[in-house]
Image (cartoon, coloured by chain):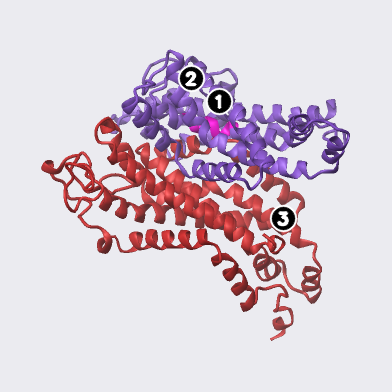
Amino acid sequence: MLRYILRRLILTIPVVFGILVISFMLTRLSGDPTDLILPPDAPDSAREAFRRTHGLDQPLPVQFVTFVGNVARGDFGDSLRFHQPALDLVLERMGATLELAAAAMAIAILAGIPIGVIAAYRRNTPVDIGVRGVSLLGQAMPSFYLAILSIIVFSVWLRWFPSGGRGTWAHLVLPATTLSFQLVALLARVTRSCMLDVLGQDYIRTARAKGLGERRVVWLHALRNAFIPVLTVIGLQVGFLLGGVVVTETVFSWPGVGRLAIQAIYARDFPVVQAVVFLFAMIFVLVNLVVDLLYAAVDPRIGYK
Amino acid sequence: MSIDAAAPAPPRKSQSNTRIVLRRLFRKKTVVICTVMLVIAVICALFPGLVAPQDPYDQSLLLRLKPPAFMEGGREGYYLGTDHLGRDTLSRIIYGARITLLVSLLAVAVSTAIGIAAGLAAGYFGGKPDAVILRLIDMQLSFPVILLVIAVVAVVGPSLTNLIIIMGLSGWPRMARIVRGSVLSVRGLEYIDAARAIGAGHLRIMAYHIVPNILSAIVVYASFELARMILLEATLSFLGLGVQPPTPTWGGMISDGRNYISLSWWVSLFPGLAIGAVILTFNILGDELRDALDPQLNHE
């Protein structure tokens, strides 16, 4: 077990390195970062000075080493817009984003898995066909469109929930549901197909044969075994959630990291963009690490080899 | 020529096989409906001038935010209403099909080309190339795609070419994975050994013996990928990072309508329906194609 954890940890090292390279290259893609950051009419002397203070006159590998050293100390440079350390700005807003992402994930798990189980159990009935139809639709609707539709219906017409901002529970409802919609659809689909596999297994027949109630068979014996692929999907979808918050936060004016990132991009505030890209990728890698370790805990067949 | 000896790859699809697949496909009503939708979208993209009732760039202050023709206050000829500049929504949706389909198709072409090359190299050679490519795939998949694409587009600028290249680059790892998996399932088969025994080179084996046999997996995946690219293009243009105005894009139209949704909801509503319909079409066609190409699913 310990060796498995160690090996898994070593495997993340090249990935983290890649994340560093990509975040570093982001501002170098267009050639000279001075062009991105300084206004176009900046005099050459100012450009020279900027290059010198930011080490841009050094060769690229040297710049990269400096960048990695700075990142290790949590220093992504100062935001060009707020004149505060970029990392602080991002961390300040992380709470709001995590709140939104956690709410969306909770909705997805609490709705998606039971829907999938029921659809599998009532295979090819109207319930199942309805679930499949809605989940196909869920995949076809862009989340920003869903967000706008829900604003039209629930805040403009019905006036049930506010159309933007953060504060009370009511503010959380629309962003969290629209963010979770595609996830609910996906989890329902995956749970359904895994449950269909499991429900056909011999041990399910055995469980029924020894007289266990249907409820116990389906929700305990079957679901527990169908859970591992579902867990993978949940882990992989963290990346989707982090991408999704960028759009959802923008539509609902939710004061989180995603909205900060978009505003930073519009304002060409690249230290902040770099910090967000790096942090989001790191979160994603960590979550997947945890999911992989969880497997080993849930399924004794994995990892001991 | 001596090459002829190795030429006929045994499982290449014969004419009758294609016909079987097609017949199996079009037996289903959903496939027929989806094909019709696809044809409509393609016609809109190719000849928007023939289909659109109005000029999509024609602004008119008098016609600002008019409701659809079927509603009270609607104008004849403006079937889905007008936007904040008095431009016809339906015509802009029709013209928008061109950008959406063009960008997504070419982006899929880019990601498929890279994905096939990388997947073939990884699956066929195994060992070091496989390990390196797998690491690269993992690395790229560990980024939230949307954020990365948004950031890169913001840096290099949202021109048509840039969009296609960046979106294409964002999609290759998944395709490479699919191709690698399919190659692995084919690589150990006897006819590959036979081709090698005759003296066929690596490139020849890959191009003539492996690719034709994994083509169906690639086609099916490409149709899903197309749906994903349409979604990505819509998201980018919604955020103002797609093809720039006044060129109509579906995402951009939804974004334009945001400020007026309390009264003029149609400006945002209809372009979204177009996006949803096109994505749904490609997803369903992909699903059905997969089923039709899979001989094991015959009984369904």
Q: Amino acid at mark 3?
A: Gly
* Percent of width and height locating residue B81: 23, 45
Say few, some or many: other residues with alpha carbon within 10 Å of mark 2 (under 14 / 14 to 19 / 20 or more).
many
A67 in relation to B298, above or below? above
Cβ atoms under marks 2 and 1 closer than 8 Å: yes
Q: Amino acid at mark 2?
A: Val
Disc 3 target residue: B123
Q: Position of residue B238 (x, y in %)?
A: 37, 39
**Which element type, helix, strand or loop, lies under badge 1?**
helix
Disc 1 residue type?
Leu
For the C terminus of chain B, the quadrant is bottom right
Is disc 2 placed on a helix, strand or loop?
A: helix
The N terminus of chain B, quarter of image: bottom right
The chain letter for the residue carrying disc 3 is B
Tell me, yes or no, whether the two marked residues, 3 and 2, touch with CB atoms within 8 Å.
no
Residue labelled with disc 2:
A90
Examine the image and state in which quarter residue A128 appears: top right
Chain letter tied to red? B
Q: State the CA–CA distance, disc 2 to disc 1.
A: 9 Å
Chain assignment, label 2: A
Residue at x-position 35% and y-position 28%: A267
Residue A241 forms part of the magenta stretch: yes
A134 sits to left or right of B78 = right
The disc placed on residue B218 is: none
Residue density around tag 1, few if under 14, some if 14–19, many if 20 or more, within 10 Å: some
Specify the chain shown as purple: A
Q: Report, in whole angstroms, how far the alpha carbon at label 3 lies from the one at label 2.
A: 41 Å
Q: Which portion, as a residue range, is magenta?
A: A238-245
